[in-house]
Image: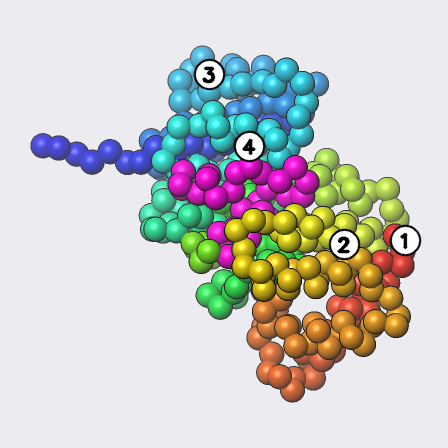
Amino acid sequence: MITSVEPLVSIVLCTYNGEIFIRKLIDSLLDQTYKNIEIIALDDCSADSTFFILSDYTVRHPSIKVYQNESNIGFNRNFEKAIQLSAGDYIAICDQDDIWLPAKIETLVKHIKDNWLIFSNSDLINENDQLIEKSLLSDAFSIKKSSYRSILINNFVTGHTCLFSRSFIDQIYPMPERGYYDWWMGFVALYHHKIAFINLKLTLYRQHDESVINKEIKPSANNQSERNKVDFRSTSTMLTVLAGCSRIAKADRAFITTIFSMYHTIDEKQELKWKIFIYLNFNQLFAFEKNRGFFSTTRIKKSSAFVENLLQVKKSIS
């Protein structure tokens, strides 16, 4: 009797000084119900014991392959290099401090179908593995009516929730040197309508003081103000990257460039102009918002508030 072999899934893990949580993560990967996996761990010159912990796992688990860079190359380049070391039909992205639920890979492989990429939802936990009672995306979140415009201002395709097909690699390489690899991947997949979303919480996504975003906002006593600055800089950077994508239509590049211009040139004299622009494109730009009717007062208020906040942040970092 001939039995079909499950497609190989490469779990790509990029590490840097992750010794505190790395064992819990690896144990959760080894506990997956989907068994035809390889784990590709690429360490970016950790100064702690991360590399040695990973190497110890390889003695007992031949499915784990561990590599280390000769010098620190940064996350985007590290991730790109790790993919090149993988052999799977599908590739799943992994953060060093999360915990994966057992059916994660099985669920994503089952639902990706002919899409390039599929992503899911996550529950948030703290450094003690306790649920924060908050999910990464709301239970009502959906991409059914989303176009590429919905990911220009806010990214909702988070790397640790993704699984993508090997055929997608040609579409996303070379990775941009600036910005965020997962935002880039989400944009490309969404632009070509080759993306799926399943609103299941398949990962316990850890929030702690040493996470990237918390390191950026920690110096300020006003965390929300500092977070707004981080968001502004992140979006501004990604708009530059996305406008430079070679595989988009001229009209779409012009639309992205218009938003880029808003971020870089907004002032009081142009405030009304940008409020009208956001109002007209409200439903397309904000995937986290409920669709609003053309004459909705909520749509008017939210469009105005967005531009006013943008202007305030722009002033604070000028």
Spatial CA distance of label 1 from label 4 is 33 Å
What residue is shown at x 55% (from left), y 37% (from top)? Answer: 174
Mark nearer the N terminus (4 vs 2): 4
The magenta segment: 163-191
Q: Residues within 10 Å of mark 1 (few under 14, many from 20)?
A: few
Q: Amino acid at mark 3?
A: Thr
Q: Are marks 1 and 3 in contact (CB under 8 Å)?
A: no
Q: Residues within 10 Å of mark 4 (few under 14, many from 20)?
A: some
What residue is shown at x 68% (from left), y 59% (from top)? Answer: 257
Position of residue 91 measured from the top left corner of the image (x, y, whole percent): 44, 37
Of 82 and 270, which appears nearest the observer?
270
Residue marked by disc 3: 58
Element marked by disc 3: helix
Q: Amino acid at mark 2?
A: Phe
Q: Amino acid at mark 1?
A: Ser
Q: Are marks 1 and 4 in contact (CB under 8 Å)?
A: no
Residue marked by disc 1: 318
Q: Which mark is residue 232?
A: 2
Residue marked by disc 4: 80
> Can residue 57 be seen?
yes
Element marked by disc 2: helix
Q: Nearer the viewer, mark 2 or mark 3?
A: 2
In the image, is 265 to the left or to the right of 84?
right
The correct choice, above or below, for 24 with respect to 201 in the image is above
The part of the image, by quadrant, that contains residue 95 is top right
Of 74 and 256, which appears nearest the observer?
256
The correct choice, above or below, for 314 with respect to 61 in the image is below
Mark nearer the N terminus (3 vs 4): 3
How many numbered dots are placed on residues in this image?
4
In the image, is 219 to the left or to the right of 181?
right
